[in-house]
Amino acid sequence: MTPPAFSPVGLRLENIDKRYGRLLALRGVSLTIAAGECVVFAGRNGSGKTTLLRIVSQLVRPSRGTLTFSGSGAPGGGESNAIRPGFVAHATMVYDELTAEENLLLFARLQEIAQPEKRVETLLHDVGLSERRGSLVRTFSRGMRQRAAIARALLHEPAVLLLDEPATGLDPQGVTWLAEAIRRLRDSGRTILMSLHGESEISQLGTRAIRLDAGSIAADTRTGATFRSILTFADA
Amino acid sequence: MLKSAVIGAVVVFLVGAAAYGAFYIAPDEKTMHVLYRIFYFHAAAAWAGMTAFFVCFVANLLYVWRRDEKYDAVAISSAEVGLAFITVVLITGPIWAKPAWGIYWTWDARLTSTFVLWLLYISYLLLRTLIEESDRRALLSALFGIFAFIDVPIVFGAIRWWRTQHPAPVIMGGPGSGLDPTMRKVFFFSVLAMHVLMAFLIAERYRLEKLRTDLELVRREAEAT
Amino acid sequence: MSLLANTSALLGKELRTEFRSRELLTTTIVFILIVLVLFSFAFNPTSDESRQFASGLLWLALLFASSLMLQPCFLREQNNDTLSALRLSVSDPFAIFLAKLAANTLFLLLAELLLLPLFAVMYNVPVVPVLHWLLLVFFLASLGISIAGTALSAISAQARMRELLLPLLLLPLLTPILVVSAEVTRSLLDREPFVRWKGIGFIGVFDVVFLTALWLFGEYLLEE
């Protein structure tokens, strides 16, 4: 990947609650993540992993509690001082009826990135989609769509990157490629939060693991639990 | 329980008094005789219905701002009560029109606009039934409620303009137009009585709504264990 | 300034998407055509009678067609959750609405312009002498329909039975536009001596009021 143009960013969640109707998806989550950490979130479906990531991405506002980012974290584009994490969600968040290049150009322009064409060119190359830049995303395989999604998330060179079960639907080669990409992003100093299911090449990249259970933090490697126990849901 | 029974009795008394006033105290009207007396109910119900919708509008704004489910409960209560009053208006209009003009519906400006109003709030209720999650339901219906209410003056204005282009029989003239002093007093008392009834119904419906949501919560918690 | 830049970038996307598939435009135009033809079967108009209610029919057909055309507006952003991508990328969420309502207004205008000659022929009405006034009414009314329709489409996309729901929510709301547009169009086609400015004013008021409401409340419509 090209050398980053950002300052490291850490984040803190204090007493986060998220309520959907009468359902409490997250309860009293408090967490401090240092700049550069690569945190793996594990937990059953419905434990709150996706909700947590969506709150950090600021797509969802918590019912209670605060989210704060620390560190200057100047992203590569745009004039805003707010931290915009890059988000690779369950859905690809790219338009099927546009080409890979058109998609990236659109999002680059929306985020007012300087020299958008050049940036898009670089990213397409970095994720290995240069040859398919003019093809509609509709024609892409799952692995390629994932790469397009990652390119979109990285357009503004975010200091914080969020990945929600990114290996879903990828074949073994795809997983290897993804692991390598995340490793390089981690080594460049980005703060990474990923939600995963079980152990894999990707979970091994984590510097810390946290298990969520019914909306609360059940275990944390920082407080003594082992990586393995968190990822396999065994009791520590 | 006792408190609402007492208040209910007061409300019934007030409405009864207004009815008595409409039938016995208000003087006879030259052309329409007994028939015109329905005006006291028709116009008073219209005012009360509009006030209820205004309450709904304020509750909608407050919900969007504060996100407290109390405001959502007020909104649904006042919308339903308002709709009930407006239904009375739409029924009493034709009841008057048939003997007076020979036809049930004359597309008179106010009544037509009232019909559109009725449709808007039926849509509001319909929208609510089609969203399951309570927070989403509250927010989205509040937003629609806001759009619907700001449309109301435009609807009334546009239809009245349309009617000036094509005049048609008017149902019951304007409220307060050419009312003699006694009529006016009876009319304002009817309006008061209707508003008290409206407030009472909204309060009761609100209580019902709170009970319903509390029951839902208890049931969910019981299912979870 | 970034609002304008964002809006034009998004408008470009909306137009590019539509002109690639042309699905909205073709279905809208065909629908209006079908309605106009069916109306003429239902009413069996002679040339005198048809002029009486032709304008009403035109606007009725337009309103029905738009409530169908506007329905995919936010629904299609649920594919691949592109709405979240937009929310993450734009600085002002109002840009999303502006772009969509601009695109929808354009599509409606296009449909109206294409259908106007056919309408004139089918119902025997003199469109050319009053063309400029008609275009003004078309523009203001289409703008109003798009503003309200775009806003409500964001609501109906999040409910059940969304295909039926949007017309149910939108059509009562658009009553002022239907009433005024039909009346002004009728007076124009009847070659009445003066233009109904007051009526046109109502449509303008509708546009301003709802655009303002959309500006004030838009971000809540997109909330997750």
Image (spheres, coloured by chain):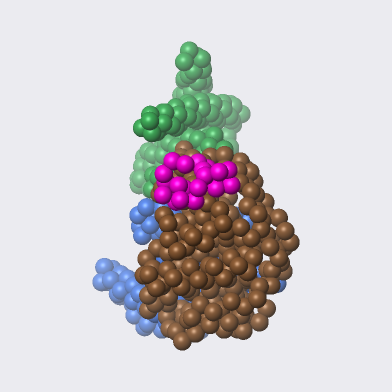
Chain colours: A brown, B green, C blue
Q: Is residue C162 left or right of residue A147?
A: left
Camera-side residue of A102 and C48: A102
Tell me where the magenta segment starts and ends, as one range: A217-236
Quadrant of res B80: top left
Picture residue at 48% right of the left edge, 74% below the top: A148
Camera-side residue of C67 and A200: A200
- Is residue C100 in view from this perspective? no
Q: Quadrant of the N terminus of chain C?
A: bottom right
Camera-side residue of C23 and B31: C23
Q: Is residue A78 magenta?
A: no
Where is residue A121 drawn, in percent x and y?
57, 84
Picture residue at 63% right of the left edge, 52% below the top: A33
Where is residue A83 drawn, in percent x and y?
66, 61
- Is residue A31 in view from this perspective? yes
Picture residue at 35% right of the left edge, 47% below the top: B103
* Count of marks overlaid on the render: 0
Q: Is residue C57 above or below residue C159?
A: below
Q: Is residue C180 left or right of residue C204?
A: left
Q: Is residue A234 magenta?
A: yes
Where is residue C53 drawn, in percent x and y?
38, 68
Where is residue A181 drawn, in percent x and y?
52, 71
Q: Is residue B1 above or below residue B34?
A: above
